[in-house]
Image: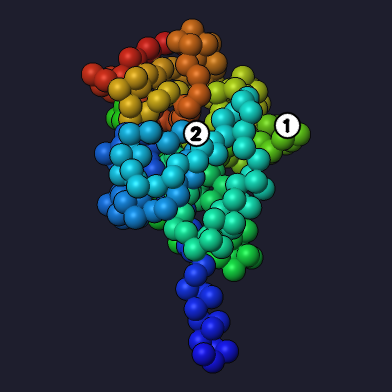
Amino acid sequence: MGYQSYNEMVVKMVGKVYLIGAGPGDPELLTLKALRILQSADVVLLDELVNRDILQHAQQARVVDVGKRGGCKSTPQRFINRMMIALAEQGLTIARLKGGDPFLFGRGGEEMVSLRSAGIEVEVIPGITSGISVPACIGIPVTHREFTHGVSFVTGHMQEGVPTTDGQNWKALVESGTTLVIYMGVRNLPTITRELLKAGMSPDMPAAAIQNGSLPEQQHVTTTLSMLPMAVRQAKLGSPAIIVVGDVVRLATSLELSKSISIAA
């Protein structure tokens, strides 16, 4: 056997990692491509917010929980990266299953770079992000030409040790006039609200918080920006939740599967 042929054989023995977006929660919002890959995967590395019903499509796979949730003990990111590399080096097909979309606040970009640096083949399968689909579940379009010319997606949860107020240019976001969609913002909502008001946003700007979007237990509040922290507290909403701030919130509707609380200023 020639040297080149041996190298080709070694390359074929190395597995592949798929970074898969599982969508906002409803298992029927999984893409067909994601379903196909899950049906052939050897290992599924599962994030905390992924609906476990999706695992019915991967009954042949070994499932490893590597989830992260704010305020709870989480699997270190470096450990996850090393695990994916080690499994791929065994020639396995790995489905790295993430809530929403892997490239939107899902650390998918970090994982892709780590895998590529180790010489591991990686493919991204986009998912339906919560920032668009969850507001849609209560009738909020994040863009609407009569209300706004765009949408800004931001995180309300900074890296450890970095205060929320230091992580965003709230003034620029307010001046942009776009719909503001905030991921992972419930814990820091009072601070976020205070910063938006300080940056010049109207206290009467419509705002909403939606918990467990797309799931039967979905519930939400609609109110004004200044009242939002109190409304979220009274409704006992927690994570996972999406916060929407902007005139498009005026279009929100109450759906049968969503417990709704509307609080006026």
Instruction: Name the one closer to the observer, 219 or 110.
Output: 110
At horizontal 69% and vertical 38% (from top left) the residue drawn is 159
Residue matched to label 1: 163
Q: In which image quadrant can residue 215 be found?
A: top left
Q: Position of residue 134 (x, y in %)?
A: 37, 33
At horizontal 47% and vertical 27% (from top left) the residue drawn is 241
| Circle number at residue 54 | none
Badge 2 amino acid: Glu
239 up-or-down from 49: above or below: above
Colour option used: rainbow
Q: In which image quadrant can residue 197 be found?
A: top right
Count residues near mark 1 (Cα–Cα under 10 Å), then give few for <14, some for 14-19, many for 20+: some
Residue positioned most to the right: 161
At horizontal 37% and vertical 28% (from top left) the residue drawn is 213
Helix, strand or loop at label 2? It is loop
Mark 1–mark 2 Cα distance, whole angstroms, equals 24 Å
Residue matched to label 2: 48
61 up-or-down from 252: above or below: below
Q: Is residue 208 visible?
A: no
Q: Is residue 160 visible?
A: yes
At horizontal 50% and vertical 19% (from top left) the residue drawn is 238
Residue positioned most to the bottom: 2
Residue positioned most to the top: 234
Q: Position of residue 113 (x, y in %)?
A: 60, 60
Q: Is residue 233 left or right of residue 34?
A: right
Instruction: Name the one closer to the observer, 189 or 171.
Output: 189
Q: Position of residue 221 (x, y in %)?
A: 41, 17
Q: Is residue 161 left or right of residue 223?
A: right
Q: Position of residue 141 (x, y in %)?
A: 34, 37
264 up-or-down from 76: above or below: above
Asked whether the beta carbons under mark 1 and mark 2 sit within 8 Å of each other, the answer is no
Count residues near mark 2 (Cα–Cα under 10 Å), then give few for <14, some for 14-19, many for 20+: some
